[in-house]
Amino acid sequence: MIRDFGKVTPSFVKELRRIVGDAGVIYEDKGALEAYSHDESGSKFYFRMPDVVVKPEDAQQISKIVKLSNEEGIPITPRGAGSGLAGGCIPIYGGIVLSLERMNRVIEIDKKNLVAVVEPGVVTNDLCKRVAEDGLYYAGYPMSLETSFVGGNVATNAGGSKVIKYGNTGHHVLGIEAVLPNGEIVEFGGKRRKDSSGYNFVRFLVGSEGTLAVFTKIYLNLIPLPGKTIDLFIPFRSVEDAIDSVSIAVTESKELPSAIEFIDGLSFRISAKYNNAKLPFQDEAKAFLIVQLEGKTRDDLERTYEKIGKAFLSKGAFDVFIADNRSASEVIWKVRRNWFESLRAIDPYVPTGDVVVPTSEIPRMMSFIEEISESYGVKIPVAAHAGDGNLHPAPLKPSHIAPEEWKELSEEILDKIALKAASLGGAVSGEHGVGFLKKKALSETKKRELELMKDIKRLWDPNGIMNPGKLF
Ligand SMILES: Cc1cc2nc3c(=O)[nH]c(=O)nc-3n(C[C@H](O)[C@H](O)[C@H](O)COP(=O)(O)OP(=O)(O)OC[C@H]3O[C@@H](n4cnc5c(N)ncnc54)[C@H](O)[C@@H]3O)c2cc1C
């Protein structure tokens, strides 16, 4: 599907400037272009300079840019905040990086229909804060909510800590306005909550990673802000005890916990140090769970955590600690949320996997990661959204291995882990997307589905200009 693409020429750039104005174009400025050459997957290994960056302000401008590029056969890579971990917004064939950063308006908070209408460049946390002012909640946010954009979340079908109760980003997308590769602007779905009239294009576009269309407007489901919440912090004597206890949190709660997060001892200590946090048993424990409960009343919550607490203790927890105020909760969540940043601080070469398995297979997946760690002689700290079976193994580069050798080796390790996840009924990515880093693993695990995806891609984007080299 990859062909010889057209070249970005000065006259092409002149046309772009005519569409978006001088302030919306970066060209021949190496320093400024560099910022758009990578995402967070590891700029030391994975980057490619765009030929030109355009920063449109509305769907009409995008339509004109896409039409022009389609005629000239020039690749377009949509870019949100660039916080991706799969290389999705890296322009691996050059051409245009189409940055959505200037399309950052919350267009409407429709309280009657409980719908937010936003442009794709809205920072996810800005939306969460904005709707909270009206007593509402946007539950589809990932843990990178302070940096990522809503458009990027939709394009990767992001997840986060609350998927077990509320589902991932895709569950909250009611509609998408998109610019197709021929420049046409089409609205799929909208404020309506049901639609049995034909194929569901909204679900289909969610997770398409910029390979089919540029999203220009998104309709999101809102719910009332949850009542009271409480966070439990539970240090365990072994990884197995912690993992085996995940199901307890589900079965013993009166309703689903809103989060069940796992972090192993090594990860915890690195992140606690990075965040200047001091928590009980942080030096002794081999693994930790963070469980968040929501309830209508304080009594409700107390009854639930009493029950869960006893069950955790019977499963080898050192103790069960309750954070029932904002600052105590924030300390715990900071350690979990900044886990990957803390690893990067000690190892700039650390990559992260993103495998998902049925939750009952988490113990087998963890054992496999341990086997791989031993056989390669590589430490692999793991953090996981344990409630939904999504694990992030992050192999640390041993000091004796040179960076280039490490690139190959870490890719091999993560591919092996991804294939194992698929063999357990899981998938090679649970929330970060495939980008180009998981293409190999995807091609080995979803063979027939991939052929069907390629058929759709050919039909939808016959010139192959939309984010080429991703997924396939
Ligand atoms: C510290 C850290 C923590 C993270 N935690 C999580 C987490 O909990 N859950 C999770 O899911 N991810 C997480 N991520 C990964 C990342 O934040 C998500 O993948 C996020 O959804 C990417 O959004 P973005 O705006 O940065 O998109 P980008 O990285 O800019 O782009 C991602 C993909 O979306 C496409 N795209 C972007 N905008 C559009 C658009 N408007 N139209 C069409 N295609 C578009 C791009 O082409 C690319 O393929 C984390 C990353 C970091 C660095």
Image (spheres, rainbow, N blue to C red):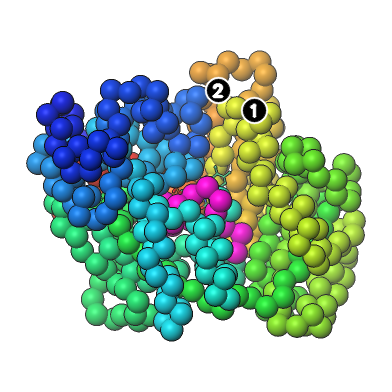
Tag of residue 406: 2
Q: Residues within 10 Å of mark 2 (few under 14, many from 20)?
A: some
Q: Residues within 10 Å of mark 1 (few under 14, many from 20)?
A: some
Q: Amino acid at mark 2?
A: Trp
Write down the quadrant of residue 398 in the picture.
top right
**Where is mark 1, residue-wise?**
347
Give, as a single range, the part of the protein colored magenta. 145-162
Residue drawn 51% across and 31% down?
42
Q: Does residue 156 belong to the magenta stretch?
A: yes
Quadrant (top left/top right/bottom left/bottom right) for the C terminus: top left
Q: Could you say which is closer to the camera, residue 319 or residue 411?
A: 319
Residue drawn 39% across and 33% down?
36
Tag of residue 401: none
Specify the principal SS of the magenta part: loop
Seen as rendered, the residue at the extreme front is 22
Badge nearest the viewer, 1 or 2: 1
Q: Could you say which is closer to the camera, residue 332 or residue 264?
A: 332
Residue drawn 60% across and 27% down?
348
Classify residue 6 as left or right of residue 54: left
Residue 364 in the image: x percent, y percent? 65, 52
